[in-house]
Image (cartoon, rainbow, N blue to C red):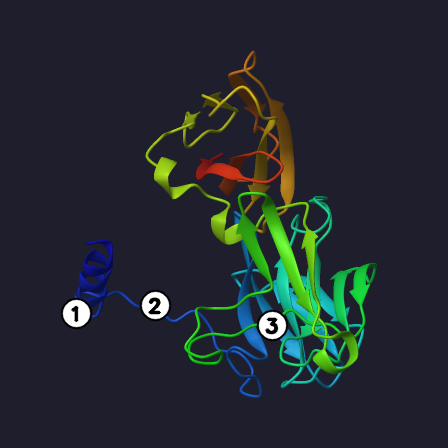
Amino acid sequence: MKKICQFLLLLLSSSSFAQITFDASVSPQIGIGSDFYTVQISSTETKYLFEDSITNTFSLYNMDLTPFISNIAVPEPFDRWAFQVVYVTRTLFDCDSSNIEYVYEAASDAFRTFYIMRTDGTLLFRLDSANGPFCAGSCLGFSDIIQPIKNTSAGAKLFLQRPFSAYNGKIFIYSLCGSLLESSFDFTMQKQEYVTVFPNPASAQLTFDIILPDNMNEYELVIRDINSREIGREKMNSSKSKYTWDVSNFSSGEYYYTLCTKNKAFQAGKFIITK
């Protein structure tokens, strides 16, 4: 039923009632899926990623195409059929949200080096002659989608393989600190409202009225501006159900909040400050 509803929605959106607005155009020398794509670095942050195979750097841009982080050097030269940037995230590998990290690997070549890097150039992990295969459709005998990182009942796991000729085809399994963002929201619980914001819009003070999903985890309320810069973070617990925030010194505009634990976001939303 869900797929049917999605199909009907697609048909409706293709009708004469559709509203499609042009945003921008980017360099004609890049291609979708190899040099340019979007990455979800946190539950509330989507960025455009541009790879530059001439300078062997990549850059992240906000959704309005203003620069976020520019000219990030990769550990080895780009190769469209080998090395690429994947899994750009804040907390999947070290759970330190003040840094941004990424995987740099040759997904189809197990004789290359697998890297996990921070955008500041810090090496977090390296394994020579290894890769995490990406494969979809009929690439492995009409298999399902194969990816090197999966969420499991025992936490997020990284699966790397090494060549048969050199390592007898061993598979290495690693536990990760965070969880894959695709599963960071529990969609079965999205009808539950954990956070109520009032007044919205606000000009002087804003109150977050919070019902925590449980009393076993440590929760935080994270606040970001429209450029995804973190401007507030407050720990929440069972004895603290309300948080009042002074917004008198902040500029007018849209802001975003997320109620989350270290590994999971439970609710995200938007509020407006007006002067």
**Of callouts 2 and 3, the N-terminal one:** 2
Describe the element under mark 3 as helix, strand or loop.
loop
Identify whether 195 is placed above or below 57.
above
Residue 271 point in image, percent of width and height = 45, 36
Measure the alpha-carbon separation of dots 3 and 1: 39 Å
Q: Looking at the image, is 2 positioned above or below residue 129? A: above
- From the viewer's perspective, is residue 202 above or below residue 240? below
First along the sequence among labels 3 and 1: 1
Name the amino acid type tagged 1: Ser
Residue under the image location 54 percent in, 20 percent down: 244
Image quadrant assignment for residue 106: bottom right
Q: Nearer the viewer, mark 2 or mark 3?
A: 3
Determine contact: label 2, label 1, CB under 8 Å: no
Q: Secondary structure at mark 1?
A: loop
Residue 177 vs residue 208, the one in the foreground: 177
Q: Residue 148: give x, y in percent of width and height.
A: 60, 64
Tell me if 43 is positioned left or right of 116 in this view: left
Residue sitting at x 64%, y 42%: 230
